Every structure is written in C-alpha cells, then in structure tokens.
Image (cartoon, rainbow, N blue to C red):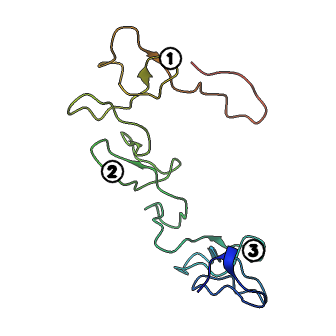
C-alpha cells in the first residue's frame, strides 16, 4: 500500500472502516446504536446514527453513546460521561496533583505553567492557573467563581 502522498493516479484507499456510501473514500465512524463498528462518514451518516469508533469506550449508562471521562479518583479509565457520572466521580483527563499519593486535581503552579499541584500541596507563590470557567449559556461572557 501507499500513503496518501505517494498514491498513484487511479489508486483508491482501502480501509476496513471505509464509509459504505458509493464512491466515498472517507473513514466511516457513524453507525446505529447497536452496531459496534462505524459504517458511514459524517457527510453520509443516516438519521439517528451515532459516533462509533471501533474499540472506543462508551458511557456505562444504558443507551448512552457518549465518551466516558469520569470515574472515582483512584481510577484511570472513564466509566461515565458528564451527564451520567455518579456522585464523587472526577474527570480522568484532568491533571493529578504531583504530590506523592495525592489524586486530587492539579490546578496550581507558577504563572504561565500548567497545573501541577492541588490546593493542599501548592508551593508558596503558586496561583490557580486553570482556565477560568464561563457561564454555560451560549454567548454569555460571565466568569464563574
């Protein structure tokens, strides 16, 4: 096979997850709820189809197809999406505190750096470097505390 850059004229891309629409060469990542693999690209997806990347985990809540990003503090893989997370669950994608045996969220560091410590383990002179949270209403510029 050849990469896209080195394909010769007349060659077509062959992929196991290629969109099933006639003459489309894009990857198919959309399918019906109970179909485990993607069949159509975003341009040719049918009504009611959801994003289905092969091997991609989905929220454990019944019938939810969103990506899971929340679990309990000592876990690394997400189990539930934001809408269905259980009480006490935290984002598994957020940076964890660099202090030994601390799993709390890290959002303190020196200005211009990414969060490295939680409030309990921040060093003198460190500030909250997390991006400000904004109101969820579309178009509202208000910052949340």
Do the residues under discs 2 and 1 have CB atoms within 8 angstroms?
no
Badge 2 density bin: few <14, some 14–19, many ≥20, Cα 10 Å:
few
User: Residue 76 shows which numbered tag?
Assistant: 2
Where 40 sits versus 130, above or below? below
Q: Earlier in the sequence, mark 2 or mark 3?
A: 3
Q: Earlier in the sequence, mark 2 or mark 1?
A: 2
Q: Which residue bears the numbered disc 1?
A: 111
User: Residue 59: image x %, image y %?
Assistant: 47, 60
Which of discs 2 and 1 lies nearer the camera? The answer is: 1
Where 28 sits versus 144, above or below? below
Which of discs 3 and 1 lies nearer the camera? The answer is: 1
Q: Which residue bears the numbered disc 3?
A: 47
**Quarter the C terminus occupies:** top right
- Is residue 7 rendered to the left or right of residue 83? right
User: Residue 87: image x %, image y %?
Assistant: 39, 41
Alpha carbon distance from label 2 to label 3: 34 Å
Alpha carbon distance from label 2 to label 1: 28 Å
Where 41 sits versus 9, above or below? above
**Quarter the N terminus occupies:** bottom right
Residue displayed at 33% across by 50% down: 76
Q: Could you tell me which secondary element the residue under label 1 belongs to? A: loop
Badge 3 density bin: few <14, some 14–19, many ≥20, Cα 10 Å:
few
Q: Earlier in the sequence, mark 3 or mark 1?
A: 3
For the image, the number of numbered tags is 3
User: Residue 58: image x %, image y %?
Assistant: 48, 64
- Is residue 75 rendered to the left or right of residue 49? left
Q: In terms of image quadrants, where is residue 51?
A: bottom right
User: Residue 38: image x %, image y %?
Assistant: 60, 78
- Residue closer to the observer: 70 or 84: 70
User: Residue 30 shows which numbered tag?
Assistant: none
Q: Could you tell me which secondary element the residue under label 2 belongs to? A: loop
């Amino acid at each position: 096979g050849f990469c896209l850059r080195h394909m010769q004229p007349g060659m077509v891309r062959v992929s196991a997850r290629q969109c099933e629409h006639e003459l489309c060469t894009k990857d198919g990542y959309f399918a019906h709820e109970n179909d485990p693999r993607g069949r159509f690209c975003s341009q040719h997806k049918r009504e009611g189809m959801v994003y289905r990347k092969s091997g991609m985990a989905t929220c454990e809540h019944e019938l939810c197809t969103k990506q899971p990003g929340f679990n309990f503090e000592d876990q690394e893989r997400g189990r539930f999406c934001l809408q269905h997370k259980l009480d006490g669950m935290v984002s598994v994608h957020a940076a964890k505190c660099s202090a030994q045996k601390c799993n709390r969220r890290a959002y303190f560091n020196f200005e211009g750096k990414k969060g490295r410590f939680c409030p309990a383990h921040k060093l003198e002179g460190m500030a909250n470097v997390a991006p400000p949270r904004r109101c969820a209403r579309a178009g509202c510029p208000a910052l949340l505390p």
